[in-house]
Amino acid sequence: MATKKNQILVPDHIYVPKHEIIPKSEAEEVLKKYNCKPTELPLIFVNVPAILGLGVKPCDMIKITRKIPNSIIDTWW
């Protein structure tokens, strides 16, 4: 018999970069800054463990901030 797996929330793990939903106004600024459309940005699935607890909805823009070992902070949209 199959059993249901428990979901493990991983946003606090040291190897998981910081994920956050940005407001629509900031999302529009990002699109203007990079001169692109929302369809030209990478997609992320709503069942990715790092964003399960954020309450992400379709069309939300996620900001991912990674810390690189040489102390540079890298931001992805």
Image (spheres, rainbow, N blue to C red):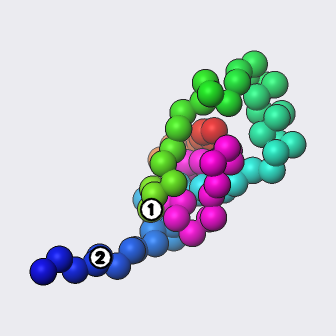
Whether tag 1 and tag 2 are in contact, CB under 8 A, the answer is: no
Which residue in the structure is indicated by mark 1? 49
Local SS, label 1 = helix
Residue 30: x and y in percent read 77, 33
Q: Between marks 1 and 2, how big is the CA–CA gap?
A: 13 Å
Residue mark closest to the camera, 1 vs 2: 2
Local SS, label 2 = loop
Q: Which circle marks residue 77 in the picture?
A: none
> Is residue 63 inside the magenta stretch?
yes
Which residue is nearer to you in this view: 59 or 76? 59
Q: Which of the 4 quarters of the picture holds residue 28?
A: top right
Q: Is residue 12 above or below residue 17?
A: below
* Count of picture labels: 2
Left or right: residue 12 compared with residue 59: left
Quadrant of the image for the C terminus?
A: top right
Residue farthest along the top direction in this orientation: 35
Left or right: residue 63 compared with residue 7: right
Which residue in the structure is indicated by mark 2? 5
Instruction: Name which residue type carries label 1.
Output: Pro
Instruction: Name which residue type carries label 2.
Output: Lys
- What residue span does the magenta drawing correspond to? 50-67
Q: Which of the 4 quarters of the picture holds residue 3?
A: bottom left
- Residue at the (75%, 50%) spot, across then down: 22
Residue 37: x and y in percent read 70, 24
Q: Is residue 18 above or below residue 77?
A: below
> Is residue 52 inside the magenta stretch?
yes
Residue 10: x and y in percent read 45, 68
Residue 56: x and y in percent read 62, 58
Quadrant of the image for the N terminus?
A: bottom left
Q: Which of the 4 quarters of the picture holds residue 19?
A: bottom right
